[in-house]
Amino acid sequence: MTRSPSGSSLRWPTAPPRRGTLILIVIAALGLGAGIVLTRGSAPQPLLALAGALLAFGLPGMALSRAMFAGPGMGRAERIALVIGIQLSLIVVCGFLLHLLRPGISPASWGSLLADITLVACAIAWLRSRGPAAAQASRPRAVTRPGSSWKVAIARASTGQLLMLVAAGLVAALALVVARAGVAMQPQTPWTALSIEAAEGGRAATLRVANAEGHPETYHLVVTIDGEPLTTIDTPTLADGATWTQTIELPSAGAFLRQVDVSLWRAADPLELAAYRSVRLSSRGVPGP
Amino acid sequence: MTAAVAPRPATSGPAAGAVSTEGLGELPRTALLAATGLLVVATGNTLSRLEVGIAPLVWWLGLLLIVVPFAVRLIGRAADRRERVALVILAGLALYGVKILGAPSAFVMLDEFLHWATLDDIVVTGRLFTTNNILLASPYYPGLEIATDLLVRSGFSTWEAGVLVVGAARMLMMLALFLLYERASGDSRLASVGVLVYAANPGFLFFDAQFAYESLALPLAIFAMWCIQRREVATGATLPGRADPAEAPRLARLARAGHPLSLTAALFLSIAAVVVTHHVTAIAVSGCLVAWAVVGTLLRFRGGRPAGLVGPAVVAVTATAAWMLYVAFITVGYLAPALGGAVDQVFELIAGDEGSRELFRSATGVAAPAWEQVVGYGSVAVVVLALPIALPIIWRRWQTSALPLTLALISLLYPVSLLARLTARGAELAQRSAEFIFVGAGFVTALAALAVYDTAAGYAPPDGWRSGIVAWLLARLRLAGSRAGRLGTAAVMTGLIVLFMGGAVLGIAPWARLPGPYLVSADPRSVTPQGIDAAAWTLDALGPGRRFLSDRTSRTLLATYGRQHPISSAGDRINLRSAYFATMLTLEDQELLTRAGVEYVIADHRLPTSLPYVGVYVERGEQFTSGPWTVPMSAAALDKWRALPGADRIYDNGDLEILDIRRLTGRAQ
């Protein structure tokens, strides 16, 4: 910020050339880095997420808006709208492009395409920044509204105002914590899930018990095959939310249709009463070895 | 007309667009109040989950705590443009937070599951245009899913990625709408209030905040409209008048420094994105651009300059029609019956052949609380009353500007949409059209609000949007000076609050607004851990793509958590209602199941405990008699599967059972 001889405030409507070039270099470097991370795919998860977020939410849009709208004429709010609007539109159109290309839509194809667009747009923006429009932009111009930039506004902000902004962020985060705590605290009907599925081509059956009773629970299972007892199982104590699975071998009986019934009781349920859960699997056996 | 009060000089209060010298102005305080409002909303949601009676009251209090500070600051004349821009973005994000806090870790709204299924298909196959059996049109409009795909592939969960993409779209919506209104009016104050009024539309709080295609397409459409208007200014076609002379140099500078070619490129890029993202938005924006072009063309005969509006309108209409006819033809069959049925019913209502729908009553027969009904009607009245106040001002002030006149024309659709609300099929159409009509109604209502406020307070804005009607009314009531000012301020603030609360009332049923215990066929309230466990188990145990006969809620869970193929009458062109609802399977039913290739049935034994809250247990047209369900479905209809020879219950969690009926339908291997 400088002041003109007449005393009016001066500012650059866009970044001055050197700073603008620096910003372009940063965007290009980040775009290249993000593209490499996504293309290789072997990066640690947080880095992969960061690369994806950068390419999905900003870098190509920022680079393209700088390439397309070099020079003066756009306010800050307009530039932000252009970055978001171009970014969201671009990514949709790019998705169609990737669909048409042989590799299809994958992290690598996303990474290479969006990084390429970012780099090319940065190059165009840099070239345009050396043109006459940018030269005009680089000339300080009188601005009739002193203090209209955000930098000045933040610089003028009182400590109380800045503290309020920080507090607002913290309170919003607390709201999310309270909402998520509500999900965890919501009373649920206690339930247990019992399931059976064929395994090993019909030679075995896999049993699964999921405990959502709201407390640790032990289960007693009785397995019959064609009405004859096959086995009984007492599961270990399952914590609330825990799952237990076990695969049981079925006796070979030729290619006949067999019916496996499984009944489940909770530890405190009297076995004389009807089972708490029951499932059935009909499967064709396979000849023995 | 008689002015009730002598106009105050323009300098008597800070002019709109004036620069605050107090750093960030009221932004920090408003942000803190909005965050506190979110905390109160979150508390209301938690109380509702714990079934505490005052939960709705707390929730409404939180919503007001968010809205009122924004309204006070934006209607007032003290904030500068920079602060207004920040405030409208913050308001949009805070109101988005209200939806997020209702389901803070997973999708629960019906449409979110429909799009999640398409996203999953794209992520798994790496290709577009897959088949989505629960929303046939979705794969042909995959813009939202594409925008989310990269984030999911980068390691974000589907919910996180969806929240981020819709959040970015929400930010674009607020900013682009502000810039559009500002371009139309030349006033940042009117623009900011207009955006706030837009946010009061019934679809804003929940419907357009969900992970669904309109949530992305609508912001892009508004962005395209702003590009057109910005391009118009860049080419020098239109230079709207400014309310504040202090703003004139800035606007003149913007008009000189154009970027028309770049804006044209951005415009066509965004129109392309809209066309492939959402059919209804594409149609709506095409219609809007055609109206805008017609108005612009007519204004040329009144001495206006060529505005370059015809090109974008032709491109939008051509692209929308071409996509719909050559790529997404399935959409025609999807939209036409809904649209045609609604129009037919409106005409029948006018002709007296059909009785009107009972408003504010759910499918279970429960009426909304009386105060909600009053607020709902009140919000409608606010918009309807705004029209006669604002339309004369628009005609007087902007009769040579195409955009304000087009926005006024769009707002005139609002009374028409009210008629559709009275019919059964038109109600949904009216509900869905609100977010488009409010693009015009927001501008018009905001203008009326500011005209009332400024006229009553005695301000004489430079552009003279003094309301003759209000001045006449004040004179009749013999109100002047501070009394008139207080009355005007109170009326405007009350109107805005009623508008906001009414939007929330009309936009979502009371039982869906807050989370809580399980309800039968009540979309967000029917998603339970039992249902999710059952659906997720099918993927683990059975693999993807199995053909299921299921109810409405299980269908969405199976298609997403389970990646299964739940059979639907639209997707599979076979109606299985007789097999599902029959208490005993007939031979015809068995043949039907065989023909549909059903492999598994999911039976939710909670369904017969109540009438369905959304009106159906499975899908439209399921009742054997005309009209809504009057008694719950029979429990025997679900029990029959257990007793069926050849059906194996392979999963049981007490509420839900999964039955293997492949031997019955000849699909066993």
Image (cartoon, coloured by chain):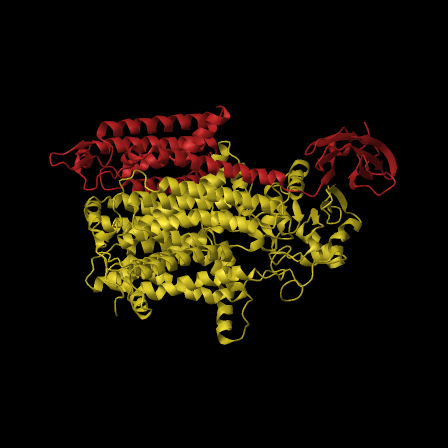
Q: Is residue B652 above or below residue B11?
A: above
Q: Is residue B443 above or below residue B669?
A: below
For chain A, give the colour: red
Image coords of residue B445 (percent x, y)? 36, 59
A148 left or right of B377 in image: left
Image coords of residue A225 (percent x, y)? 84, 37
B14 left or right of B604 in image: left
Extreme residue in the left direction: A5
Please tell me which residue lies in front, B616 or B500: B500
Q: Is residue B79 above or below residue B295?
A: above
Please tell me which residue lies in front, B197 or A32: B197
Residue A10, quarter of picture = top left
* Residue A221 in view (yes/no): yes
Extreme residue in the bottom direction: B352
Please tell me which residue lies in front, B478 or B282: B478
Extreme residue in the top direction: A43
For chain B, give the colour: yellow
Q: Residue at x 27, y 33 (%)?
A: A124
Image coords of residue B385 (percent x, y)? 38, 65
